[in-house]
Image: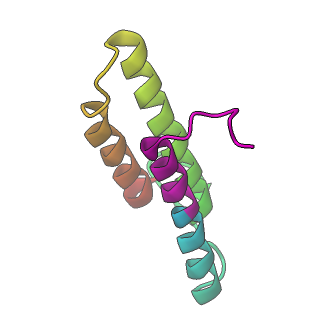
Amino acid sequence: MLSWMAWTWPTALVFIGIFSAIGTLIILEIRTPGGDERKGVLGLVTTRGDRLFIALLGSSYIFLAWLGLFGTPLWIPLPMAIGWAVFCFRKV
């Protein structure tokens, strides 16, 4: 039934991580409605969901650029992607 995609443990962990982040955002939105809007270094007014989207999009670009320039292993760009996500949630 799900044979159209190569479901490996790393793939499953990525999806589990994304859905966990969305679940966390839902809980935070119930606790403090409004999305915690703020204006960051990019000059954009963003909410928590916007910052998650920017972090996920930037992380995918980091991994794609690494694959295009260097190939595998992907453990090396992982700290860069985590650093980008931390930057997004603190400064954007």
Q: Is residue 67 left or right of residue 24?
A: left
Task: Work out which residue is located at the far top of the displayed protein and give it.
Answer: 69
Picture coordinates of residue 24, whole percent (x, y): 53, 73
Write down the quadrant of residue 35 in the picture: bottom right
Q: Is residue 36 shown to the viewer in this render? A: no
Query: Between residues 19 and 11, which one lies in front from this camera angle?
Result: 11
At 42% from the left and 20% from the top, the residue drawn is: 65
Picture coordinates of residue 16, whole percent (x, y): 52, 58
Picture coordinates of residue 45, whole percent (x, y): 60, 57
At 26% from the left and 34% from the top, the residue drawn is: 75
Pick the quarter of the image with the N terminus. top right
Q: Is residue 74 shown to the viewer in this render? A: yes
Q: Which residues are magenta?
A: 1-19
At 30% from the left and 46% from the top, the residue drawn is: 83
Q: Is residue 39 left or right of residue 78?
A: right
Please say whether residue 15 is one of the residues in the magenta stretch: yes
Picture coordinates of residue 40, whole percent (x, y): 47, 55
At 52% from the left and 65% from the top, the residue drawn is: 20
Please say whether residue 4 is one of the residues in the magenta stretch: yes
